[in-house]
Amino acid sequence: MENKENKPQGLHENAYRKLKKGEEYKPLLSPDKNYPEITVWSVTIGLVMTIIFSAAAAYLGLKVGQVFEAAIPIAILAVGLSSVLKKNQALGQNVIIQSIGSCSGVIVAGSIFTLPAIYILGLDVNFTQMFLSSLLGGVLGILFLIPFRKYFVKEQHGVYPFPEATATTQVLVSGERGGKSLKVLLIAGLIGGLYDFIVATFGAWAETVTSTVTRWGAAIADKTKIVLKLNTGAAVLGLGYIVGLKYAFIICCGSLLVWLIINPILAAGFSGVDIFGMSFSAALGQMSADEIFRTYSRLIGIGGIATAGIIGIIRSSKVIGSAVKLAVGEFSKKDGGAKVQVKRTDQDISMRSVVMGIAVALLGVFAFFAFGGVVDTIWQALVGMLVVAVIAFLFTTVAANAIAIVGTNPVSGMTIMTLIITALVLVATGLKGNAGMVASLLIGGVVCTALSTAGGFITDLKIGYWIGTTPAKQEKWKFLGVLVAAVTVAGVVIVLNKTYGFVGEGALVAPQANAMAAVIKPMMEGGSAPWFLYGIGAVIAIILSFLKIPALAFCLGMFIPIDLNLPLLLGGAIAWFVSTRSKDKEVNAARQEKGTLIASGFIAGGALMGVVSAILKFAKVDWFLTDWNATYGEAIAIIPLIALVIYMIMASMKVEKQQ
């Protein structure tokens, strides 16, 4: 039995600040002792979490274009289960549960940002191709990140804030005191899940409210192409709370620039115009705001995202150099003579094993491309493998750096750049048309998943560093989580494609995949890419970077539909409101934390019930109130949304001052 005096009480006061000269950070779990980490319980629950959250994140990501990070809700559930079952020495095991389970979000992001684009283009991809693309990308992401672990989590201690890792660590540590968090999460999950299930399955009210619901709004939209839209879902509202007001506002600014300024300008003055090789349709003025956005405006955002990725690499050059130096130092250590004893909390998979693993994984990538129906020739497979190796390695630091600073992985922007490079290279090797599109997207899928996995894994490793688990154990068992997540995501994408599809009325939005399709199609059909619109986005990104405004977040807002961005602003505003009402900082912090639990419940519950709804539709169980929704849906949708907002605020504000 673990005595109360041996129970971890909290992180050391120097956990979040820079260390003084000669000072050392001491984790909760002593490096000189061994604790239960890899057990039947931790691995089994971790894999169950991986399956559940992979399905939920895939549905939500394809619907709204944002993949929620599963680390916090998984950590809450791990703590809750451990408390209910009264497990002793659960902290180390809960870290492993979270680390394995969080494979869900990262693999989902890598997969759904690219692979659905193949369906969008009217082409086909099979289960094996999707599975291997996700698996190989995930494995490379883990291996490429390991040499950078010490730099990011130890050498830069106190430099990077690691917002998501901080929140997750606090959940795991505070969870040792009891299971109240689980109760809050379950109630919020039930409310959010039922709310979104009623909308998606029964159609009791509209998922989206638009300004065209009124006569004056419809008239303005017809004459000026100005339209405002708001998604009423609980999951999207919760996502906005987690994102926070600052970044939600920046994302919305990008969206408002497109829908209030760029769309009207294009409609008013660009019909039938040819400029820098870019031909605008003569019917542009008659298009709806949505059509203008999908056909033209969104491409500006794509150019901005690609440019923001390049700027990120340039700014990360010192990070790459420093981390490589650390990695080379580890690899060059001689094994002869007496081995240096390394503390448990500093043990990684050996550099030799990492290098061999990278070699094997890249050979697997080559074999997949050459013999998996991806490319036509061995030469093209070799070129594809080199593209994956170089870009995935370089962008790994960008992904880790972004996660460490703001908790957001700019993987979609970096993937768009990868697709552009891949398309140019494959066209040069003679691979064009439909085959070239599929090949480019599968290659891009490997890179995208590698970057997503690397970015997410640095969070897991930082959590382990603060708490005091063994890095090598996290690294080894992460591979199993990636394998299970890859299988789950491939199956879910196929089911969702057959149920909803990604093109046409009622289809899942899949904004990133649509953006990927828009990038790759013209380049593979012998036409010219819309460089003029990409260039406008590039200029915007450069100006934003000079002004020190997060260009990636702004440009992401430019190509995600506005109805999915405005709820983020609403959720972010709620987060600001509940965390600033009191003069007592401790009360504000407690409210913020409880709101995070509620938002996580909304996200998890809404996304999970969305998957249930998709399965019911796939099974031809049709309960949708089509006529009712068409007549009254938008008119009444704002009422349940207001009720949801009121609940979120009141429940978050009702806390006791932490002792």
Image (cartoon, helix red, strand yellow):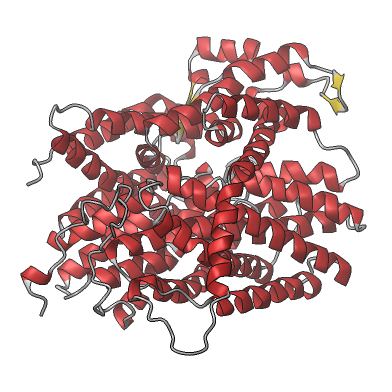
User: Looking at this view, is 226 or 144 the one in front?
Assistant: 144
Left or right: residue 503 versus residue 71 is right
Residue 468: x %, y % from top left? 29, 67
Left or right: residue 231 versus residue 452 is left
Do we see residue 499 in this rendering? no
Residue 108: x %, y % from top left? 53, 58
Left or right: residue 532 versus residue 136 is right
Residue 295: x %, y % from top left? 72, 31
Residue lying at 69% horizontally and 56% vertically, measured from the top left = 391
Q: How many marks?
A: 0
Residue lying at 33% horizontally and 49% vertically, measured from the top left = 193
User: Looking at this view, is 442 or 27 the one in front?
Assistant: 27
**Quarter-wise, where is residue 472 in the image?**
bottom left
Do we see residue 645 in this rendering? yes
Q: Quadrant of the N terminus?
A: bottom left
User: Looking at this view, is 39 or 273 the one in front?
Assistant: 39
Residue 304: x %, y % from top left? 65, 33
User: Looking at this view, is 601 or 421 the one in front?
Assistant: 421
Residue lying at 32% horizontally and 70% vertically, measured from the top left = 469
Above or below residue 357? Residue 76 is above
Residue lying at 32% horizontally and 67% vertically, measured from the top left = 95
Residue at the extreme bottom of the image, as rendered: 337
